[in-house]
């Protein structure tokens, strides 16, 4: 009876997950390959720390002379009516090049947090009958209110996932004016929480596009090799009034394969075909990608997709049926340079991923602690790196709050729908270092169920806190977390020897309890200021300490029988307002193996040699 009850509960969880994954608006994957125009470039910006453009001084609606988003040219209006009072003028405000966080717009913006208004004008052709128009943002941190030609287009919360707002009825032939109010203030019940260990890069940090589509278009096409490796499957979701019953085809020219069918009443076509014998699997070191062309009605959507399987078998992680050891490194989304703006281009992403793959001999990157730019995940596909993708359920989130849970579920669904064609992604992480509680277990358990409902081809994980027990006189570390039951791969952040008073000699002797699932060290690390050497005292923050810490922690790794991978914290020093030692940190977390400008520290070679040896052994 109990087993029946458990099965009913499990089925209800998946149904709830699927229900929650119901989509708010269009996904518009591959927006960069659709018709329309890239609105990156010069925008005017105006700071608004007291949110004067949102509410008047008695908290009523903002007055005419304060509404940054009004469809008006202030200079013209005030010339025509000298009595008019305006306390803003977007067209004559300073300019900046987007996408980029506002921290680098001007020296006085370096520490600005709050609301900034952006505006630009652009020309658009008249829409043809039936065409539709969307404003698509790849990311704006943290909330965004969008207006087109003085009218509300919509809003969004969450700084790391894309959103699309339909503006068919607002777009006009000729000149248009788009205004965006971006507020970096974290919500106390949002994700990530107000306190993190990274800089809040406020602003429009990823590209903005005007996307033009047919009335019914291919919104999302998930094309993959099924988990058993036997079938090519394509779930194609159409958006538009003619979606139901629409004929759909998916062509993979390199496989001489066409999947055809019809969309159901829900606008989704689920197509399958046996995997052709000649299929060449995507894998680290052999990143084979195929051009995919999806056609439905007047619309064509293209993508480049790799086909591979990933699974857990016993205590191993297998890619294409072969056990792998994840030779990884963690990355924040922050480009090389003294003054990063979280502006990720193909070149800036390549510089970082190449340092991981070619410098460290890594086959894996943990993209912490939020969904990184699509530029990065597509590049990981091309470069043959395995990827851990994560949503910012980080430290202390308001786990008992229904609004927070809905936000987290939407964030995760948006991240998965954007990236589930990326062969490089093998792990979806639902959290990082969250304190155990009933509410947290339920919250994260729901997220784990959602992942499985949205994508049954990848593994679920989370970065947990390790626990330490003394057994038989020995220090034994391990995982003792109720969430483990919901995960495929267990992961722990372990900092023995940095955030503990263990001597570095003692670290090498710490042993780990075996786990019934594969274990990954999702973080370990120590700070070092590049160039600070202290061989005599081996003080913390010296390169000597950091190198020794790595030698000893890698020795400890040999004492973890279930270990199947690691992603030390972190490739590059990154900005964190919590790190203010005036000599060693100056607002930077210095656990990078390279400095902000890419100078390799002594510990870099320790890890690179270790991975090179593992690679040589075929691990
Ligand atoms: C934690 C956390 C990181 C943080 C790191 C550190 O494990 O996950 O976000 O930066 O430790 O303290 O440096």
Image: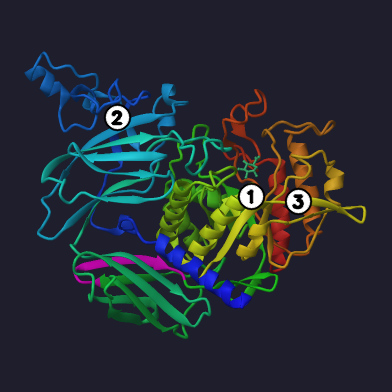
Name the dominant secondary structure of the magenta segment. Answer: strand
Q: Which residue is mark 3?
A: 467
- Find residue 378 and report its image quarter: bottom left
Where on the image, by quarter, is ligand 1? Answer: top right
Measuring from the top left, give residue 547's x and y in whole percent: 75, 43
- Look at the numbered disc 3 and give the secondary structure of its residue: strand
Measuring from the top left, give residue 533's x and y in whole percent: 75, 32
Q: Nearer the viewer, mark 2 or mark 1?
A: 1
Q: Quadrant of the C terminus?
A: bottom right
Q: Residue at x 11, y 13 (%)?
A: 83
Measure the alpha-carbon separation of dots 1 and 3.
15 Å
Query: From the Cβ of disc 2, is ligand 1 less than 8 Å away?
Result: no
Q: Quadrant of the N terminus?
A: bottom right
Q: Which residue is mark 2?
A: 54
Q: Toward the viewer: 519 or 598?
A: 519
Left or right of 617 on screen, residue 1: left
Q: Residue at x 20, y 19 (%)?
A: 86
First in sequence: mark 2 vs mark 1: 2
- Look at the numbered disc 2 and give the secondary structure of its residue: loop
- Answer yes or no: is residue 387 visible: no
Measuring from the top left, give residue 614's x and y in whole percent: 72, 62
The 10 Å Cα crowd at callout 3, few under 14, some 14 to 19, many 20 or more, is: some
Q: Is residue 333 magenta?
A: no
First in sequence: mark 1 vs mark 3: 1
Measuring from the top left, give residue 338's x and y in whole percent: 53, 32
Q: Which residue is mark 1?
A: 437
């Amino acid at each position: 009876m109990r087993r029946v009850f458990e099965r009913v509960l499990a089925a209800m969880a998946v149904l709830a997950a699927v229900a929650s994954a119901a989509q708010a608006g269009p996904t518009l994957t591959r927006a960069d390959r659709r018709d329309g125009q890239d609105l990156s470039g010069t925008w005017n910006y105006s700071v608004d720390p007291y949110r004067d453009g949102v509410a008047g001084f008695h908290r009523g609606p903002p007055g005419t002379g304060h509404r940054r988003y009004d469809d008006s040219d202030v200079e013209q209006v005030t010339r025509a009516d000298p009595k008019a009072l305006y306390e803003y003028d977007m067209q004559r405000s300073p300019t900046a090049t987007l996408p980029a966080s506002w921290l680098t717009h001007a020296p006085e913006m370096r520490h600005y947090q709050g609301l900034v208004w952006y505006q630009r004008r652009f020309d658009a052709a008249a829409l043809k009958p039936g065409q539709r128009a969307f404003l698509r943002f790849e990311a704006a941190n943290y909330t965004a209110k969008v207006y087109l030609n003085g009218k509300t287009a919509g809003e969004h919360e969450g700084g790391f996932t894309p959103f699309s707002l339909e503006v068919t009825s607002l777009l006009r032939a000729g000149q248009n004016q788009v205004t965006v109010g971006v507020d970096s203030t974290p919500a106390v019940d949002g994700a990530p929480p107000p306190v993190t260990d990274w800089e809040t890069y406020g602003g429009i940090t990823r590209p903005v596009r005007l996307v033009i589509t047919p009335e019914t278009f291919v919104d999302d096409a998930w094309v993959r090799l099924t988990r058993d490796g036997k079938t090519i499957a394509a779930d194609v979701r159409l958006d538009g009034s003619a979606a139901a019953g629409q004929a759909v085809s998916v062509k993979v020219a390199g496989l001489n394969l066409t999947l055809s069918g019809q969309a159901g009443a829900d606008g989704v076509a689920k197509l399958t075909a046996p995997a052709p014998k000649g299929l060449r699997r995507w894998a680290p070191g052999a990143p084979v990608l195929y051009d995919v062309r999806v056609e439905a009605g007047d619309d064509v959507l293209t993508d480049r997709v790799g086909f591979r399987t990933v699974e857990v078998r016993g205590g191993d992680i297998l890619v294409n049926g072969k056990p792998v050891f994840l030779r990884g490194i963690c990355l924040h989304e922050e480009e090389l340079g003294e003054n990063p703006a979280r502006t990720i281009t193909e070149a800036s992403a390549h510089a970082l991923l190449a340092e991981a793959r070619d410098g460290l001999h890594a086959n894996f990157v943990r993209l912490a602690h939020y969904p990184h730019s699509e530029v990065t995940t597509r590049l990981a596909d091309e470069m043959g790196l395995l990827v851990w993708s994560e949503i910012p359920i980080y430290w202390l989130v308001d786990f008992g709050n229904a609004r927070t849970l809905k936000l987290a579920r939407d964030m995760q669904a948006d991240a998965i729908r954007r990236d589930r064609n990326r062969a490089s992604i093998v792990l979806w992480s639902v959290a990082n270092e969250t304190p155990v509680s009933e509410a947290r277990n339920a919250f994260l358990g729901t997220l784990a169920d959602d992942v499985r409902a949205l994508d049954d081809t990848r593994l679920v994980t989370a970065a947990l806190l390790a626990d330490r027990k003394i057994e038989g006189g020995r220090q034994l570390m391990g995982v003792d977390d109720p969430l483990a039951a919901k995960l495929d791969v267990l992961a722990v952040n372990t900092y023995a020897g940095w955030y503990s008073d263990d001597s570095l000699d003692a670290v090498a002797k710490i042993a780990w309890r075996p786990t019934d699932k594969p274990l990954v060290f999702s973080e370990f690390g120590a700070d070092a200021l590049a160039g600070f050497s202290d061989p005599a005292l081996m003080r913390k923050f010296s390169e000597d300490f950091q190198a020794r810490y790595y030698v000893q922690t890698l020795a400890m790794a040999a004492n973890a029988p279930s270990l199947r991978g690691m992603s030390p914290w972190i490739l590059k020093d990154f900005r964190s307002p919590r790190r203010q030692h005036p000599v060693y940190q100056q607002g930077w977390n210095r656990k990078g193996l390279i400095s902000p400008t890419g100078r390799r520290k002594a510990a870099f070679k320790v890890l690179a040699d270790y991975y090179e040896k593992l690679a040589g052994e075929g691990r």
